[in-house]
Image (spheres, rainbow, N blue to C red):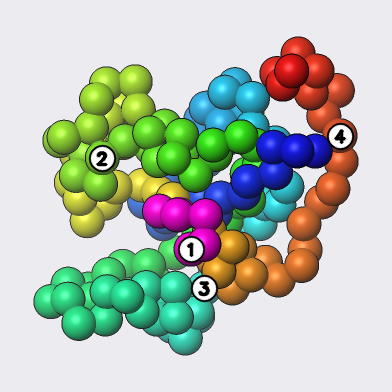
């Protein structure tokens, strides 16, 4: 497939606990993106510290790690044209109060510290995050609607 940009989307513990995984998956599927990997993960401190290492000098870092250790997360890899930028639009602004209605955060949360999901912020970071969380465990398949989504 020529539109093979990929992104890492993670439903955080609050989204898992609130039963929002299916609703989040539905938004990406309805848009036309392809699910390449999905797993329920109980992350280790080491994995989370590596994932969030760019934030390790921020005052909220330890609280973030503690929160992310509070329950399982659902990691996903999505693929398709412009999936990184569009995925972030589907998620909404990091601060849910600044997220538009119709976005995941705009519809399902209020507080930044409980903003339900993570989405890669660039293609380069997406590939790093996918490698960190999934290695090479990605499913390759052709979606039956491919020709109805892409020219």
Name the residue that disc number 3 marks: 43
Label located before the other in sequence (1 or 4) = 1
Label located before the other in sequence (3 or 1) = 3
Name the residue that disc number 1 marks: 125
Position of the N terminus by quadrant: top right
Label located before the other in sequence (2 or 3) = 3
Question: At which x and y percent is residue 116?
Answer: 36, 47
At x 44% / y 73%, what residue is drawn?
Answer: 51
Asked if the stretch drawn in magenta spans residue 106, the answer is no
Question: At which x and y percent is residue 113?
Answer: 22, 56
Q: Nearer the viewer, mark 4 or mark 3?
A: 4
At x 66% / y 42%, what residue is drawn?
Answer: 79
Label located before the other in sequence (2 or 4) = 2
Name the residue that disc number 4 marks: 142
| Mark 1: secondary structure | helix
Measured Cα–Cα span from mark 2 to mark 4:
31 Å
Q: Which residues are magenta?
A: 120-125
Query: Residue 93 shows which numbered tag?
Result: 2
Q: Residues within 10 Å of mark 2 (few under 14, many from 20)?
A: some
Q: Residues within 10 Å of mark 1 (few under 14, many from 20)?
A: some
| Mark 2: secondary structure | loop
Q: Is residue 45 visible?
A: yes
């Amino acid at each position: 497939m020529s539109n093979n940009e990929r992104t890492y989307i993670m439903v955080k513990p609050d989204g898992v606990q609130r039963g929002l995984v299916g609703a989040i998956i539905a938004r990406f599927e309805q848009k036309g993106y392809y699910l390449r990997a999905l797993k329920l993960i109980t992350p280790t401190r080491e994995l989370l510290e590596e994932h969030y290492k760019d934030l390790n000098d921020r005052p909220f870092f330890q609280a973030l790690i503690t929160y992310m250790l509070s329950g399982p997360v659902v990691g996903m890899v999505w693929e398709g044209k412009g999936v990184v930028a569009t995925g972030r639009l589907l998620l909404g602004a990091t601060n849910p109060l600044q997220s538009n209605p119709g976005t995941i955060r705009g519809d399902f949360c209020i507080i930044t510290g409980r903003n339900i999901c993570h989405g890669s912020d660039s293609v380069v970071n997406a590939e790093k995050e996918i490698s960190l969380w999934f290695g090479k465990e990605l499913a390759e398949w052709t979606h039956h609607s491919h020709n109805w989504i892409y020219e």
